[in-house]
Amino acid sequence: MQENQQRIRHQVCAQRAALSVEDQTSFSAQICQNILDSGCLESAQHIAFYLPIRGEADPTTLQAQLAKNHPDRTFYVPILPEDKQAKLTFAAYKPDSAMIINRFGILEPDLSQTEILEDATKLDAVIMPLVAIDPLGNRIGMGGGYYDRTFAFKHQDNAPQLPQLIAFAYDFQMIETQTPQPWDVPAEAIATQSSFLRIKSAGY
């Protein structure tokens, strides 16, 4: 299974890197629009998304549109922990937030100047990055397991419905059905440039 996932990572990352800037922008805008059209974020007040790197589909247009229409909402981006076995925390984000480059070479809010959310159950929705995902929401990431650890509470009996976990992907990142590991936490909806697929309802 690990070899298969590595093969998928290699193939999809190569496809992603081959996209032109124009295609990245166009495809990402279509994904954002499909999320808006779905209505899944109508009641969400605390929304996490991510800042794209290495050709990832870009959800920042979605954040900008939501912030424009709903200025009372709070947006967050994930912060990778120093401990590789720890969970994500989330830093409040605005387009004019003071930013720094973290140890991974990724822009993140200056943590000394922003609100930090440590309890992921306080989020209403999470726009999730990925390398690949199957129709059941089983995602392949970069292998760090941060999202699985952070949202492991979704496996509990009577787990909270929120946050709704929404995968954000190009069409070519959809792959055949995978066999998940017990610790894998699936997405509950998948947004691509062609469709919005609800896998599990979270009360919206």
Image (cartoon, helix red, strand yellow):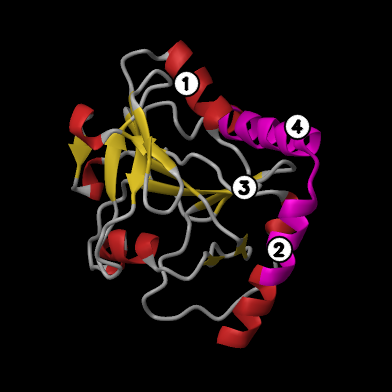
Mark 1 lies on residue: 66
**Circle 4 residues within 10 Å: few <14, some 14–19, many ≥20:** some
Q: Which residues are magenta?
A: 10-36
Q: Are marks 3 and 4 in contact (CB under 8 Å)?
A: no
Cα distance between the residues tagged 1 and 4 = 18 Å
User: Residue 184, located in which quarter of the rendered image?
Assistant: bottom left
Q: Are marks 2 and 4 in contact (CB under 8 Å)?
A: no
Numbered disc in front, either 1 or 2: 2
Predominant secondary structure, magenta span: helix
User: Residue 80, located in which quarter of the rendered image?
Assistant: bottom left
Q: Is residue 167 above or below residue 35?
A: below
Q: Is residue 192 above or below residue 113?
A: below
Which quadrant: the N terminus? bottom right
Mark 4 lies on residue: 26
Mark 2 lies on residue: 12
Q: Earlier in the sequence, mark 1 or mark 4?
A: 4
Report helix, strand or loop for mark 3: loop
